Amino acid sequence: MPNPPPGIFGNNRTMVTPHYAVMPPEGILESRLPSLRNTLVRFHTSPSMGARFAQALLEVAPGGGTIAPIADGLEHFLYVVAGVLEIGAGEDRRTLDAGGYAYIPAGTALHLLAPDGPAKAIWIKRPYEAIPDLRIPAALFGHRSTTERRLKHTAGRAWQHLLPDEDLGFDMAVNILSFAPGNYFPFVETHIMEHGLYMLEGQGLYLLGREWHECWTGDFIWMGSYVPQQFYCTGWEGAAYLLYKDINRDVLF
Ligand code: UGY
Ligand code: MN
């Protein structure tokens, strides 16, 4: 048996606190779910961590996916990280490669299939917070390569809103934030919204509370409500992350 990778004892980066979590991929063990065949589910976060949503990395083997369409009453968001996936919202089925994404509204059944090779996707799900008289969003499919890149305040930092940000029917946002090396936010953010962050590429330093954490491709970060946060992009090639955020809803008592 080969030696285990070095660095476990002195250099492990995993950090889970009541307010935030940093989780490198190598330590996130897999679950198997009765609703998914030939699929490993690596849960990033869930209400048992303190989050109000769930996020997982799905590793789907060829031919794997939903045994029957999932109709659990939750809203779902899927982002293809590698390979090709057939994703369905009700009867509407699309074949998406890396960068493709789908929003499946609450009450619409989710279908998933890796038609030929292995595939990976980020899976976000949560109960939808309906507001009387506000239209429930329809299913939506898109691709990172064709989603508008908006510069915010400076060149070298771009935002892509994968869900239309002007539609208050959505109670979640999923954005891709891209950074040129050395770029950072002009202030430390503190806000009521929580985040699930998946590092798509590159590396950087994340301020969470009062501590800086080095992070890179494949890492997951959960930021609970009000956790002070800031990103500083290191490396020479830039960085990008997928960012879930709960939005457009009043406080709950
Ligand atoms: O939209 C956001 O809250 C975003 N700027 N936060 C983050 O990247 N940590
Ligand atoms: Mn934020």
Image (cartoon, rainbow, N blue to C red):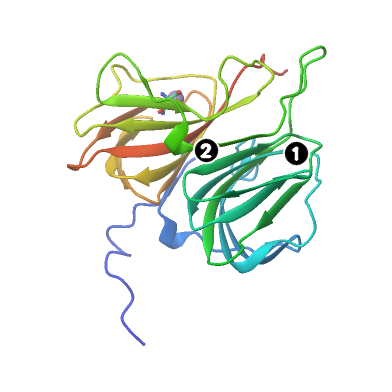
Q: Quadrant of residue 9?
A: bottom left
In the image, which is nearer the foreground, mark 2 or mark 1?
A: 1
The residue depicted at 56 percent of the width and 41 percent of the height is 101
The residue depicted at 20 percent of the width and 34 percent of the height is 181
- Residue type for callout 2: Pro
Packing grade of label 2 (10 A; few <14, some 14-19, many >=20) is few
Residue corresponding to mark 2: 18
Q: Secondary structure at mark 2?
A: loop
- Report the front residue among 51 and 104: 104
N-terminal label among 2 and 1: 2
- Compared across the picture, whether 198 is left or right of 42 comes to left
Return the mark for residue 74.
1
- Residue type for callout 1: Leu
- Compared across the picture, whether 198 is left or right of 96 comes to left
Return the mark for residue 62.
none
- Compared across the picture, whether 5 is left or right of 34 comes to left
